[in-house]
Image: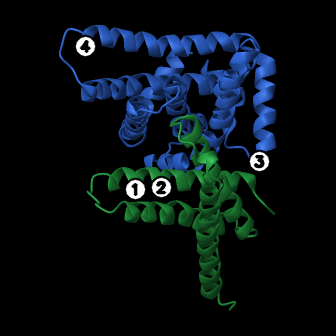
């Protein structure tokens, strides 16, 4: 069964982790812009997949997929309504964004499920 | 009621002190810095809406550990400060998502004669005190029950909270106006204000809305 409360917990933990670690990373001068974005992508969507597999053990992939979509949608809305960046004028970028987010979160969820099953001795 | 509030505050002062440093300080700092960031960005459309959202979020996010403390205290136990921090992390997501949705409704409601705005703000005031329910339907049901029962007096509650915050802020600004100051001074004063005012408001609101926990022998 899909637990909505646990799903919200997943999103909250992911946002909290992203805020805290990005705040700390801001103190380290990283020259490369791509590296910073890469770390943030792995952090946000990876933690979504990880926590979804832990807190929603019966439907890990649905929770990871929906969580990644929700986080991407929140970021689109914030950049459109608050910072006035024209993200909705670039459909290719939106497609890339969504697919990367979903791929990373599903990969982390699958890895967590495999590790848990190995630890329990099922595989 | 006031005697009860200060009684709870005195019995749990060590937890409140730790949570002021670990929860209220970082949340206030991040919300204030994000407000400044949005205001200084060149392309921002309407930074006022975002700042009000940050202020409301700052108030709502810190509620769960204090609410848990009052509930546990009424059952004659005491709460560990680490438990409160874990409870804060657990409740963060649902508070964040619901606040976002209902703040969006409140902003859209400006075009409808402010009626949805008031309803959404009243909902935002009450739902954090029932957010530990088992599912989303239960949270809605409990919140709407309280709104039906308390009805118009909730708007007075909202006014009291806004006026307390704004009044303390104005007094501090009058005090600060004579000196040269920068963002850091404002930040320190804001953290101080929040750490002073928030726990008392939270204890009062928990005792007010969670009627089933208040023992009649205490009053």
Q: How crowded is mark 4: few (under 14 residues within 10 Å), some or many (20 or more)?
A: some
Query: Mark 3: which secondary structure?
Result: loop
Residue A93, placed above or below residue B109? below
- The image's mark for residue B135 is 3
User: Which chain is painted in green?
Assistant: A
Nearer-the-camera pick, B215 or A42: A42
Distance, label 2 to label 1, CA atoms, is 6 Å
Distance, label 2 to label 4, CA atoms, is 35 Å
- Chain B shade in the render: blue
Q: Do labels 2 and 1 share a chain?
A: yes
Tell me where residue B3 appears, x and y as whole percent: 50, 16
At 64% across and 9% down in the image, what residue appears?
Answer: B156
Mark 1, residue position: A21
Q: How crowded is mark 3: few (under 14 residues within 10 Å), some or many (20 or more)?
A: few
At 53% across and 45% down in the image, what residue appears?
Answer: B88
Q: How crowded is mark 1: few (under 14 residues within 10 Å), some or many (20 or more)?
A: few
Are discs 3 and 1 less than 8 Å apart at CB? no
Residue B5, placed above or below residue A84? above
Mark nearer the viewer, 4 or 3: 4
Mark 2, residue position: A17
Q: How crowded is mark 2: few (under 14 residues within 10 Å), some or many (20 or more)?
A: some
Distance, label 2 to label 3, CA atoms, is 24 Å
Distance, label 4 to label 1, CA atoms, is 33 Å
Mark 4, residue position: B176
The disc, 4 or 3, on the residue closer to the chain's N-terminal end is: 3
Query: Mark 4: which secondary structure?
Result: helix
Are discs 2 and 1 less than 8 Å apart at CB? yes
Residue A81 relative to residue B171: left or right? right
């Amino acid at each position: 069964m899909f637990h909505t409360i646990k799903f919200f917990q997943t999103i909250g933990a992911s946002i909290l982790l992203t805020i805290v670690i990005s705040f700390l990373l801001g103190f380290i001068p990283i020259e490369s812009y791509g590296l910073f974005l890469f770390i943030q992508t792995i952090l946000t969507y990876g933690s979504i997949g990880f926590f979804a597999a832990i807190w929603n053990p019966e439907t890990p992939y649905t929770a990871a997929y929906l969580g990644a979509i929700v986080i991407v949608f929140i970021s689109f809305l914030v950049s459109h309504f608050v910072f006035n960046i024209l993200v909705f004028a670039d459909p290719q970028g939106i497609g890339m964004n969504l697919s990367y987010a979903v791929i990373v979160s599903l990969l982390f969820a699958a890895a967590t499920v495999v590790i848990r099953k190995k630890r329990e001795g099922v595989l | 009621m006031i005697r009860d509030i200060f009684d709870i505050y005195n019995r749990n002062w060590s937890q409140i002190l730790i949570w002021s440093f670990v929860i209220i300080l970082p949340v206030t700092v991040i919300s204030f810095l994000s407000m400044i960031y949005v205001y200084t960005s060149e392309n921002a459309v309407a930074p006022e809406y975002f700042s009000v959202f940050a202020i409301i979020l700052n108030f709502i996010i810190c509620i769960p550990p204090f609410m848990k403390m009052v509930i546990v205290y009424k059952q004659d136990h005491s709460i560990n400060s680490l438990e409160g921090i874990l409870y804060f992390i657990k409740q963060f997501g649902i508070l964040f998502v619901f606040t976002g949705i209902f703040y969006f409704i409140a902003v859209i409601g400006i075009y409808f004669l402010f009626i949805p705005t008031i309803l959404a703000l009243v909902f935002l005031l009450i739902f954090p005190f029932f957010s530990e329910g088992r599912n989303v339907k239960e949270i809605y049901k409990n919140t709407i029950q309280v709104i039906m029962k308390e009805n118009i007096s909730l708007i007075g509650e909202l006014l009291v909270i806004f006026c307390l915050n704004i009044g303390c802020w104005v007094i501090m600004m009058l005090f600060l106006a004579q000196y040269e100051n920068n963002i850091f001074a404002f930040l320190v004063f804001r953290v101080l204000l929040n750490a002073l005012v928030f726990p008392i408001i939270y204890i009062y609101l928990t005792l007010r809305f969670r009627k089933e926990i208040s023992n009649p022998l205490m009053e």
